[in-house]
Amino acid sequence: MEAGRTPQGVLWVRVPPLPPMTSPIARCGSPSRRPVVLVDLDGTLKTATSVDAGDLSVEVGASRWRFAKRPHVEEFLDAVAAVGRVMLCTAAGGAYAHRVLRALGIPDRFEAVFSEESFARGLPWFDRFILVEDDPDLGVQKIKCMVNGAPPSPWASDGEIRSRIVVVPKYLGGPDDSLLAAVQEVEAALRN
């Protein structure tokens, strides 16, 4: 790094270029004929952020969140990985998402992680995909961000978008609130 002052006394700093970032899109690899299963984080794989209970916690900046892992998360991810490419799609920030995945013990279970920052750039469009989400209205908004932050294509009315969302009950910490019941819905949605 170099620094100095111009003849007029203005401070200047020359910073070397940063190495190229690997975006979540680049990490997806080459296009595949396998369908994509986008999985939400809060309320789907763990307790919702509004629920401050559980034996796990993460800190991001000055904020601390306590949460519980939904029962049978690993089994659910194994089952959907058998029928499609599994990717995380969360409206939360990237630092939070990665820390939560580590706390849940599943940081390497996703081909890509699309977080709040990804939505600003626009998500890739997948021809065959479904979204597993606890909030269908938020799911519609996520899907509308798939092409450069704009609605995808003229076919995509809210009703058609909702047909690509497998809605699971919001996880509030109950022991019987398993994701395994959603596996058949995911398989059926991918067949359509």
Image: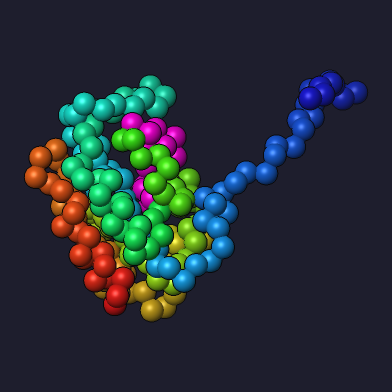
Q: Is residue 43 visible?
A: no
Height in image: 179 above or below 105?
below
Residue visible at 20% across and 59% down? 182
Q: Is residue 36 visible?
A: yes
Q: Is residue 129 magenta?
A: no
Task: Tell which of 176 and 158 is nearer to you.
Answer: 176
Name the colour scheme: rainbow
Count of picture labels = 0
Task: Tell which of 149 and 128 is nearer to you.
Answer: 128
Q: Quarter of the image holding residue 42?
A: top left
Residue visible at 48% across and 58% down? 123
Name the image quarter holding the C terminus.
bottom left
Q: x and y percent of residue 155 in the render?
A: 38, 79
Height in image: 120 above or below 37?
above
Task: Tell which of 6 and 78 is nearer to you.
Answer: 78
The residue lying furthest to the right in this view is 7
Q: Quarter of the image holding residue 4?
A: top right
Residue visible at 21% across and 45% down? 72
Task: Tell which of 10 and 107 is nearer to you.
Answer: 107
The magenta segment: 88-103
Query: Going by the image, does 48 lie left or right of 140?
Result: left
Residue visible at 15% across and 57% down? 181
Q: x and y percent of residue 11 in the render?
A: 79, 22
Query: Going by the image, does 95 lie left or right of 43?
Result: right
Q: Main secondary structure of the magenta part?
A: helix
Q: Quarter of the image holding residue 10?
A: top right
Name the image quarter holding the N terminus.
top right
Q: x and y percent of residue 158 in the render?
A: 29, 70
Query: Going by the image, does 10 lie left or right of 104?
Result: right
Height in image: 10 above or below 180?
above
